[in-house]
Image (cartoon, helix red, strand yellow):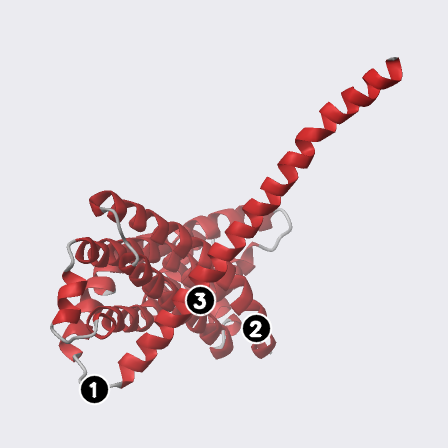
Amino acid sequence: MSDSRATTLVIETVKPLFVAFPKFFGAIGGASLDFLSTFGAVARLTWLTMVAAIKPPWEPRELFRQIHSLGIQSLSIAFLTALFTGAVMALQFGFGLQRFGASAYVGKLVSLGFVMELGPVLTALLVGGRVGAGIAAEIGSMKVTEQLDAIRALGADPVKKLVVPRVLACIITMPLLALLADVVGTFGGALVSIGQGLTITYYLDQVITTVNINHLMHGLIKAAFFGYFYGIIGCFMGMQTSGGTEGVGQATTRAVVITSITILIGDFILGKMLLPFMS
């Protein structure tokens, strides 16, 4: 009788696991299918955008308007982020290296870190959040108010009218913003380093002898891809919006989250691919 009770107790203990495991793997499978479906849809939108971009007629006026809206109006974000990040890096590196007598190398660390990583990545995260959310909200509002259907009814292509200028503007402006961040961040580090006893001449000499064209191109190439990431994701989320104004808010949130994750993952992959060219 005791053996029967023990067997029953074991069965009752193990039974929830047999119920939970299929649900767990089912959830993983569902999430994987959703990811693959979304990835395929973004890849398809990318192809349609490339095809539409090379087909006339071209609209340079709309492209310049998007460059101003998505790039020039993001200058303040890139400037302030780079300035204070460079200052903090110089402050922390100067304090940490001082105990080893290596505080003179702050210029090398700040400039190289900004040019290869912090300049493009931090700028892309902040600017991408702003731009991706704005694109998703704008196109999402057009989707829920049936303006996209109206564009199709008039014989125009929404991808040509809406997606192409925004994605191209992001790809063009992101490397320029990253380059600005490199310069401003290095300058911010110089201001702090001067306060720690280094001369501006020595600091700039460290920067010039450390950073070369390969390092600069490493960061700018990544920045161009980051611009594509937040541009195409913002457009995709906007065009997939449904459910009225609540759906627009959800699409905007998803655009920011997915853009940030994609930039961080893309930074690792692109860095791994580009590092062999640094020598």
Given residues 63 and 207, the one toward you in this image is: 63
Q: Which one is earlier in the sequence, the residue at label 2 or at label 1?
A: 1
Residue at left offset 60%, top offset 55%:
102
Instruction: Give the amino acid at mark 3.
Output: Gly
Q: Which one is earlier in the sequence, the residue at label 3 or at label 1?
A: 3
Q: Is residue 32 left or right of residue 62?
A: right
Up/down of 211 relative to 262, above or below: below
Give the Cα distance between marks 3 and 2: 23 Å
Whole-percent x, y for residue 216 in the image: 45, 73
Residue at left offset 39%, top offset 66%:
42
Q: Label 1: which residue?
A: 56
Element assignment for label 1: loop
Q: Label 2: which residue?
A: 273
Whole-percent x, y for residue 192 in the image: 41, 51
Crowd class of label 3 (few under 14; some 14 to 19; many from 20; radius 10 Å): few
Q: Nearer the viewer, mark 3 or mark 1?
A: 3
Q: Which one is earlier in the sequence, the residue at label 3 or at label 2?
A: 3
Element assignment for label 3: helix
